[in-house]
Image: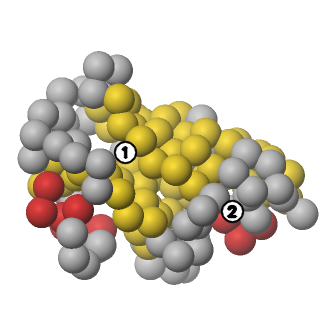
Amino acid sequence: QVQLVESGGGSAQAGGSLALSCTHSVAFVGNWCVAWFRQATGKEREGVARIGISGPNTWYADSVKGRFTISHDGDKRALYLQMNSLKPEDTTMYYCAAGGLLHCAGLFSPRNFPYWGQGTQVTVSS
């Protein structure tokens, strides 16, 4: 059973930084794609960043490109999202997710990721 647990959310001033972590209960070896999504109240869940376990094929949403960095540490069974130059519009719930490696290419849809964490809140004040 794959379980994902996020941590590291909280509050920051605009222009500041936060780092999110997501630990997973099983080792992801080879053909996995792990990702961060976010979802504001009343809006669809949107992909923020994704990374393939077997290779450094990362992808970022245009809204976070150059500000956020996704990484994965297999030894620690952890996925990270370093968020710099935060903006008030980054305020929302953030979720980590895991799925098959093929979902690290093409359409970045939450429907393609069967495993989810419980979410962590990020609040950025102006």
Task: Give the residue number, with chain letter if any, for mark 2.
Answer: 91
Where's residue 103, x and y in %? 18, 64
Asked if one can make out residue 99 in the rendered structure from this viewpoint, the answer is: yes
Based on the displayed image, in which of its 4 quarters is residue 45 positioned? bottom left
Asked if one can make out residue 119 in the rendered structure from this viewpoint, the answer is: no
Quarter the N terminus occupies: top left
51 up-or-down from 41: above or below: above
* Mark pair 1, 2: CA separation: 18 Å
Which residue appears at 67% of the width and 64% of the height? 90
Task: Give the residue number, with chain letter if any, for mark 1.
Answer: 117
Name the residue nearer the viewer: 89 or 72: 72
Name the residue nearer the viewer: 11 or 69: 69
Horizontal side of 77 relative to 32 (left or right) equals right
Which residue appears at 53% of the width and 76% of the height? 62
Local packing at callout 1 (Cα closer than 10 Å; few below 14, some 14-19, many 20+) is many
Q: Earlier in the sequence, mark 1 or mark 2?
A: 2
